[in-house]
Amino acid sequence: MSDLETRISDLMRACDIIAKRLHGFKRMPGLLIYSSSLIVVYALLLIISYFTRLNELIYLIELLMGLFGSTIIFILHMVILRKLNNHVEVSKYLHSHIEDMLKIINLELSVESYNYLAKFLAVEKAPLEYMPVLLVIPYLSLLTVENPLFSILLIILFLVALPSLLFFQMELFNRHVVYENKIIREVFSRIGNNEYDPYEPFIVGLKDVLLSIITLGIYLIALYAKVDAYLDNHIVKHRRNYRLFKINYIKKSKELLGFTQL
């Protein structure tokens, strides 16, 4: 095996390892999604308690619904954001290796595509380390449950914060998608194939924040499930595109190796 063949083989092997990690997506368990609806029960009980005094058993149920509901929906929120972050970071490694693979067989990207690649690599991930601070809001609501109006306002604040942060995360992810589409178009053009699947953005807007509040979190839970399904479909496209890229890349590399051996 020639030195060039060895380098191509090593790059392909490294790319396969990264792609396997990128494509290893698991949907969120249904139990996590459904159990997060406990926050809705808590919000309803708070509204009821504003108009009428609850007996001790219902009061205890209210506290438990608030504790478990707010914690579970926060976990759901973190799982979604972590998945999006991980995808953005791992795909950076994948595209960097693909660029190296093209370069080694003399199919370098254009200057414009290099600029897009630089912007793609510069897309930030959402800062998750401070997210647990959000739990202070619903937990404070539990401590002030004797004042239903204040507790309701705190839960509304919580239901504003979660979709707002999801909006920020999806803005970053959509930026990632825009640059990724530009890069992949150039990559497939270089290998002589334009049959790739383009990636679609997922838009979260003010309407989603308002509906999350109006529905006391029901819409927000459905939104998380939609984002999870969207990411699953996004990764399915990644698998197809990578498989197609690899088939055509092998053909191109064989052409180069055949030429160099003449």
Image: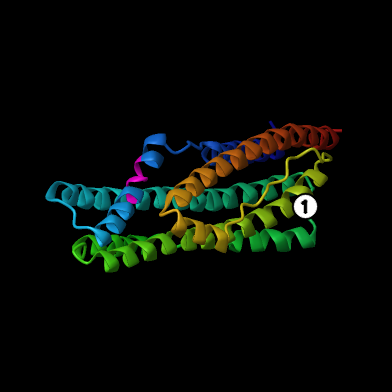
| Residue 50 showing in the rendered view | yes
Point 31% across, 58% down: residue: 47
As for residue 38 lying within the magenta part, the answer is yes
Q: Is residue 5 visible?
A: no
On screen, residue 147 above or below 197: below
Give the x, y percent position of residue 226. Answer: 54, 44
Q: Main secondary structure of the magenta part?
A: helix
Determine the residue located farthest toward the left in the rendered image. 56
Q: Quadrant of the C terminus?
A: top right
- Asked whether, in this view, residue 222 is left or right of residue 36, the answer is right
Residue that numbered label 1 is attached to: 108
Give whichever of 12, 175 is nearer the camera. Answer: 175
Residue visible at 33% across and 52% down in the picture: 44
Q: With 168 as the anchor, is 144 left or right in this view?
A: left
Give the quadrant of the N terminus: top right
The spot of residue 88 in percent (x, y) is 55, 52
Q: Is residue 178 left or right of residue 107?
A: left
Q: Residues within 10 Å of mark 1 (few under 14, many from 20)?
A: some
Look at 41% across and 60% down and name the residue there. Answer: 159
Q: Residue 71 appears at what percent x and percent y?
A: 30, 51
Residue segment shown in magenta: 35-39
**Left or right: 63 in relation to 255:** left
Determine whether the residue tagged by mark 1 lies in a helix, strand or loop.
loop
Q: Is residue 73 above or below residue 142?
A: above
Which scheme is used to colour this image of the protein? Answer: rainbow
Q: How many marks?
A: 1
Amino acid residing under circle 1: Glu
Is residue 228 or residue 204 the one in the foreground? 204
Residue 215 image offset from top left, x and y in percent? 45, 53
Q: Residue 72, relative to residue 154: is it above or below?
A: above
Instruction: Assess whether residue 204 is covered by the magenta stretch.
Output: no
